[in-house]
Image: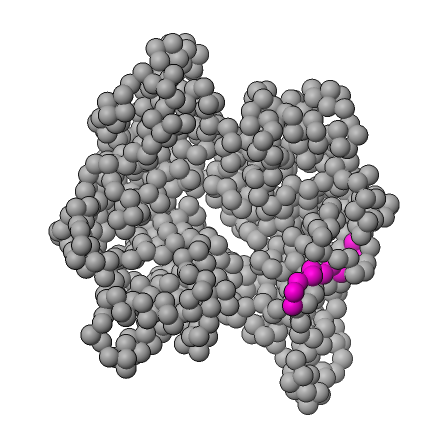
Amino acid sequence: MSMLEIDKVSKLYKSGTFGGGLKAALRQVSFNIERGEVVSLIGESGSGKSTLGKIILRLVPPSAGCVRFEGADITQMKGRALHEYYRYVQGVFQDPFSSYNPLYKVDRVFDMVHQEFFPHLSGDEWAARVGSALEAVTLNPGDVFNKFPHQLSGGQQQRVLVARALLLDVKLLIADEIISMLDASTRVDVLNMLVGLKKRGLGILFITHDLSLGNYISDRTVILRNGTIAEMGLTPLVFGNPRHSYTVSLLKAVPQLHKKWEDIDIDELLAAELDREAPALAPRGPESRRYSKSSLAPARQARAKDILPQGEQGPRPSLMDLPGAPWQRKMSSPRLAKLLLSQPPPELVEVEEGHFVAVEG
Amino acid sequence: MSLKVDNLRITYRTLRGDVKAVDGVSFSVSDGEIMGLAGESGCGKSTLGNSLVFLEGRMRHLGGRAELDGRELPIADTRAMNEYRMRQVSLIPQYAMSALNPTRKFGKMAAELLKSRGVRFATVEEELRRRLGLVGLADNVLNLYPFELSGGMRQRATMVLSTILNPSLLIADEVTSALDVSTQRAVGEMLMEFRERGFVKSMIVITHDMSILAQIADSILVMYAGKLAEKAGSDTVVNNPLHPYTQLLLASLPEVGVRYDTSALVGIPGRPPSLLHPPAGCRFRARCPFAFEKCTEDPPFMELQPGHQVACWKAMKDAGLDIGPAVPPAAAVGEEASR
């Protein structure tokens, strides 16, 4: 049994002017995380990667599907069970400073964990525990104790947050873009710290949009596109032998130091870009549907079957066209939700051992 | 010679004193050159770029001059600069995505902006539409509010608007930072195309991302703690850097294909010095593995190879230059203590 099983998780967000429209951020996403494994979840903005992290942390409920941690369904957890769950699963987010209460010194951050989760531990035992947690994140206690968050550098702030998670009996860390706000010279240190934690048996879900960071640290990679898995598998296989056209185009766009973009073919990339900029697709009135059939090129028409609205990248539809607006609404929310949830994601095929690729239609 | 900056010094006023964000910087950008300006956050790279266009209220010009196409830029005089802005020197601001007025349609905002430059919108409207088409934005963008555009589209619209009067120098401040990889590539290539098409003559691209600069820049200038560290052609900086800071920075970049188990990368320990009271001597020496006694003196920004300037005593020694005797250690210790 895997440590964390994500089983056909879907999430619909309300959208549109009056919240009557629905947008599928995730569609039946399934994968597992084993003990002591680093899985990187890579996707562009709007792909649903952060939503999945939030669902695992119970910050938002999924619309369908379930998440099991060591066999127990966490989506239904309440009270004591949930409290216990947070002992094992913790998250660290992109902007470290906004995770802190600016009025609390670092000591108090740790003390709150002490009171909340380990009231029976004596002061000395607790101090030893804090010491070892700080050591694990390669922080010098003298550098952080008795300081306010604003007195710490970005890298130190992130490490203190990871140390806070380590004070618990954490088994899974959700690291959501934790290094994108850090400077290039300190980024690698935080990455290496995560590698060190992994060696001590911590499982990490590393959420990022930066392919090179994901490649550096992870054992397995999941590439998310518009809420569905495009490709997943062992990192060397996904990066060394990408099979999905989306993965290929992402890899081609990564700026590299020693290889110029000009040497890399752009046609497919442009095609992907144009594709993404196609008008947002959502169920509308019959007229607009007829319009879309006659005016879109065949390739786009194929996409038009896909009911999924585009991510952040495409142009936003005008206010009059928003699917949720009352004058646009031809379908009731529950019906639309049912329709969205019943849309199966592209099927995943195992092309080689430990390497799954979505079928492209 | 398009832009020539000579010993420029800019400070920021804060409650605790003046932050010397740009401290005696001299460089030049030739016609048609895309110069990358790289460095960590807080190294003064954005201050340097902004100061050539607009000095904010908190910023103060302490000394030095900038010359564009043979005419001096009156950077300390914000009113006199009006004549140059957008026509001679233009800026794509950091967070260009949020630089658009949310209460105006893009077209109306463009018209108001151009009016403030004394240009009638009708005279450039056709060109504006043409250029918007070039970057893949349909005509109707002019009739849309910024919130109706995606981040990438807003970025592109801002880029077109900043360059509509064909400025001689364009300063692009972190234009790719907030974007996804595929949009990053599109924007990067767009910058190069703007130069090919003659929309701008030369460009300073400010970013912390060295790999973007390796793609689009002709030359790279590396800044550290308000001072220049190294300048050379982009291939030279990437493949053969001489300053220890550039070397360590490049070595700490994870690239696709690099994994922790095959080749572990290392960061640079420590953090940059505070620019409120910058230390004397080489500012990188506290973090530098090669620091020696001489480093307590300020290193000059010297051309060690043709077109390759470095401010580092060690690089000068390695190049076989006579760097003179080091300061006696006692003096260095005394100076250390006085800080």
Residue A286 appears in the figure: yes
Residue B15 belongs to the span the image colors magenta: yes
- Give B160 or B233, whichever is nearer the viewer: B160
Q: Position of residue B263 (x, y in %)?
A: 41, 61
Q: Which residues are magenta?
A: B4-16
- Give A332 or B67, whichever is nearer the viewer: A332
Q: Residue placed at 56% from the left, 47% from the top?
A: B212
Location of the C terminus of chain A (image quadrant): top left
Q: Position of residue A335 (x, y in %)?
A: 23, 22
Q: Residue placed at 31% from the left, 78% from the top?
A: A127
- Give B22 or A43, whichever is nearer the viewer: B22
Left or right of B246: which side holds B117?
right
Q: Position of residue B227 (x, y in %)?
A: 69, 63
The kind of secondary structure the magenta stretch mainly shows is strand
Vertical relation: B285 (above or below) A31: below
Left or right of A7: which side holds A94?
right
